[in-house]
Image: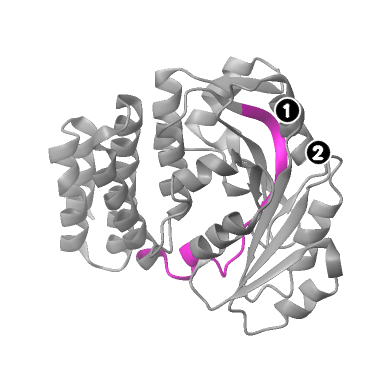
Amino acid sequence: MTPRFSVIIPAYNSEATLARAVDSVLAQSYPAQEIIVVDDGSTDETSDVAARYGKKLRYIHQDNAGVSSARNRGAQAASGDWLAFLDADDWYYPDRLQLHAEWIQKDATLDFLTGDYEYRDDAGKLLGTSMSQHDSGRMILAKAAGSARVVMDQAHEIQAYVADHFGDTHTLSVPRSIFLDLGGYPLGYKVCEDVHFLTRLVSSSRRIGIVCVPLGVYLIHGSSATRRNPLAAQQENVRTLTDLKQLSQHFPAPVRLGIQQRMQSARYNLACALTKNAQRSAAVRAVLPSLVSNPGWRSLRDVLSMLKG
């Protein structure tokens, strides 16, 4: 099967970066069938930037409803059988689609694919790579033993990936039919919505293709939600994961365990943010639920560290 990719770019007030994102898709060695820019109610010149490309992309405008809504809108409108996503401030490397397309053609048993990517700052400085900075990524790199391709299919690998995933939205390739069956990205969440969808996708998958070379760039900048208001971001992170945990009772055991680990980390990060805001009592309350859901030394250590401030 020759995959036909629809690349979906949600954009909100992205006049400064949208062209770079679009150009990176147009430069792919394996051409996308279509590029869909979903303008999520921008108030700047985002629409003018998109208009310069004419028929090279499809432009959809909607009232501001959030990035999940924009991605879902693009998926519903897509004509390709595979979906790939790219935020308007990030960009692909030239072989991003080809590295996935070639593998899809050779192995029809892969449920979805992802891969490594780079972190860079506004000046273009390389800050690191995702797989090398996550425990789950280092585990898969060790399994790959230098190969550019490796299949993630073991229970302990799945659990580690859910607990601390290394593949982000812009490295994800997923069949459109599966995306729609899962309901796409959840609405009403501003942080961790990508983890919510990815975890549900993993729960219905058995063989996941990992490309162990960087497929693109994730831009680190100070205006992101997690850096603009860290406390609010951590609170939203826990809220999103709480919803995911409630949905997980019928997920495979490795996925459920991974969610528990991720929730414990999220509660600890929230407690740290509360402590930095001189809310020590609230910080203790934030980590106490971990003693119930994950009793053990780590949970006790989290509580004690907040008591000490």
Pick out the residue farthest to the left: 292
In percent of width and height, residue 48 lies at 78, 80
Quadrant in which residue 223 is drawn: bottom right
Residue 53, above or below 146: below
SS under mark 1? loop
As shown in the figure, which amino acid type bears the numbered disc 2? Asp
Q: Residue at x 36, y 56 (%)?
A: 237
Q: Residue at x 84, y 62 (%)?
A: 56
Q: Residues within 10 Å of mark 2 (few under 14, many from 20)?
A: some
Residue that label 2 marks: 95
Residue 171 appearing in the image = yes
Q: Residue at x 64, y 42 (%)?
A: 171
Mark 2 and mark 1: Cα distance apart in space:
19 Å
In percent of width and height, residue 286 lies at 21, 54
Between disc 2 and disc 1, whose residue precedes? 1
Q: Is residue 93 left or right of residue 218?
A: right
Residue that label 1 marks: 1
Residue 220 counted in the magenta span: yes
Q: Is residue 281 left or right of residue 156?
A: left
Judge by depth and name the residue closer to the eye, 44 or 120: 44
Quadrant occupied by the C terminus: bottom left
